[in-house]
Image (cartoon, rainbow, N blue to C red):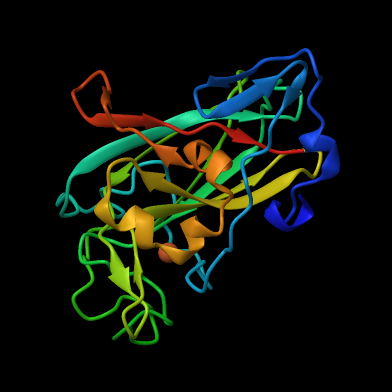
Amino acid sequence: MNGDRPAGFSRRKLLISAGGSLLVAGTARMAGAACLAVPAQTEGPFYPRRLGEDTDWDLTHLGQGTERAQGVVIEVSGRLLDDVCRPVSGGTIEIWQADVQGRYHHPAAAGAPDEGRGQGADPNFQGFGRVTTDADGRYRFRTIKPAPYGLGGSFMRTPHIHFKALAPDGGALTTQMYFAGESLNGEDFILGNVPPDLRPMVIVDFAGQSADGVPRGIFDIVVG
Ligand SMILES: [Fe+2]
């Protein structure tokens, strides 16, 4: 059993009352009074070394620029929850991701100069965003769907968004969110390390729509 557990997955979160039925509520799985933590996944090498001036909720525009980032605009929203599924207000949610060319705005990215905006990277894409959860624990980002990217050899990362969540009481989670229906999902070695029964928690269906018609996915984040 322990070998199937992702990093940071405490025994306490695996304790499910015998009489409690396991049900899926958004991406937060509830069992009795417990709320299963979203599996932790690696931060990877592309967390920003230095934040830009623009780190707001809308990654499709950079600073005062009027041009929109290339790619399919999406919204991802959800709630930050504690391990008994109570909303966590005042928490910090950060995302970072590749652009429509599969490039991170980071010095470690392929072709990136010192300032971290690699050759061919979209100059209008913000790359990183940070928001604070509201009184109901909710957050929202507008961004673009990231492209897959190669890691050398034949290793490809399926499209994904990196998340880091911090609760005011110190609870924290670093993970990655994936897109339902992607052909590369079955080959991605990081997603493949998430136990199969927990993968639905990190694979999000963007079948919903925002009020202005943008594809929207719901990704709830449970921290202990
Ligand atoms: Fe990544």
Residue 161 in view in this figure: yes
- Image check: 162 left or right of 164? left
Looking at the image, residue 6 lies above or below residue 190: above
Task: Name the quadrant of the C terminus.
Answer: top right
Looking at the image, residue 17 lies above or below residue 198: above
Residue 159 in view in this figure: no
> Residue 111 occupies which quadrant of the picture?
bottom left
- Is 120 in front, or is 14? 14
Outermost residue on the right side: it is 12
- Image check: 202 left or right of 31? left
For the point 81% across and 45% down, the residue is: 10
- Image check: 192 left or right of 103? right
> Residue 107 occupies which quadrant of the picture?
bottom left
Give how far across and how far down residue 90 sits, in percent. Answer: 67, 32
For the point 27% across and 38% down, the residue is: 74
Q: Quadrant of ligand 1?
A: bottom left
- Is 160 in front, or is 58? 160
